[in-house]
Image (cartoon, helix red, strand yellow):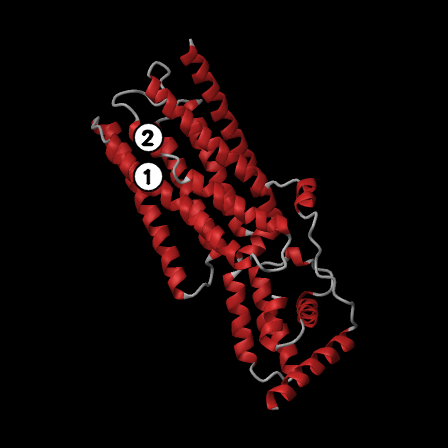
Amino acid sequence: MLDDVLYNIFVIIFVIFIVIILSVGVFLLLRGLQIKMNNIIIASVGFISLPIGVIGYFVFNFSGLFQEVFVYISFIMTVLFTNKTFYKRRKHGFRHLANWIQLITIILGFIQILLLSIAMVFGINVYYLRVSLDFPYTFIVFNWLAWSAFKSYKNLKEYDIEPWVKLRYKLIAFFSFIISFNNLPEFFQPKGVHWGDSENIISLILFGVTVILCVIFAMGFLIAWIMPNCFKKKINKNYKPAQDKEYSEEELMKLIKEQLDQKSFSDSQ
Amino acid sequence: MGENLAKNLNISPPAARGLIKLSIKDEFGPFKPMTQLNYEDFRAIITQSLKKRLLNLEVVNIEDVISNMLEDLNQNQSVITMAGV
């Protein structure tokens, strides 16, 4: 009885997760098209792919392979978003690292699809091998985003930037870090038991932990990307942007010339 | 960008910010809001209109200033996305 109640609660949480992720994806797609930002359109494809895979699998009973392909698209798009947002035209070291991470993600994702295909076609149980490789796959994708957002936030912390923008960095860094551990519970899944089976308490608990982690991540990203204006205003409450005196073009150029001349004079002293 | 330019030229931050605003106006006219500028737009502002203005001001180490500004843009490019969405 309690098992069934818990199972139903977890399923509802899972549905909430899917709805939030889909909403964030659609919002980013529309916003990306509106402001013509390719990296945002890429991120939106990543967000939308995940629920397509899950809905196809759970609602329309498509194969696990269908879901895995859409997870693959989602993860690749996430890495592409990270690279295009944080590392475009960066110095060689950063670019190489970004390219390596992209390549590793492509390979690990491909292995996931391959192992699942092998299991489906030949009936070979490769669950633990798959899970072992699924951990670095998820960990790299989301930790790379978390680390990139955190590093950028640290660089920009002292700059005169609106606090809600800084908060967005922090939310993305924190919740990406949380979700990078999302598939750890899979290691403890009992052999031969269906994922989330309400008749197996361990499987049910693992299912619960996973969906709770997912919904926390989704809510964090929902706040980060779809921040209502009233919330932004609240965050900016104590922020006073630099109010510069208005100069005409001639006055400003004269002022700069004077400051530059003053600098060359003091340099020559 | 303003703070970085101020440091590079050793001028006051308001003057540097004013110079950047003028460079944006030179490149895109007076009606394009800052939030609608993307990475390529900022790159064009630095390498074209700002460079021209620095030439007119007879700044000596222009190439170093431009290169520092581009490096700063590359390092902090994510803010265009984070503040633009």
A201 left or right, relative to A124: right
The image position of residue A116, as x and y in percent, is 28, 32
B31 or A105: nearer the viewer = A105
The amino acid marked with disc number 2 is Glu
Q: Are marks 1 and 2 on the same chain?
A: yes
* Vertical position of residue B32 compared to residue A80: above or below: below
Label 1 belongs to which residue?
A135
A22 or B71: nearer the viewer = B71
Q: Report helix, strand or loop for mark 1.
A: helix
A196 or A258: nearer the viewer = A258
Contact between labelled residues 2 and 1, with CB atoms less than 8 Å apart: yes
Q: For the residue carrying disc 1, how many other residues have a C-alpha within 10 Å: few (<14), some (14-19), or many (20+)?
A: some
The amino acid marked with disc number 1 is Phe
Q: Residue at x 33, y 16 (%)?
A: A200
* Residue positioned most to the front: A269
Q: Quadrant of residue A204?
A: top left
Q: Chain of mark 2?
A: A
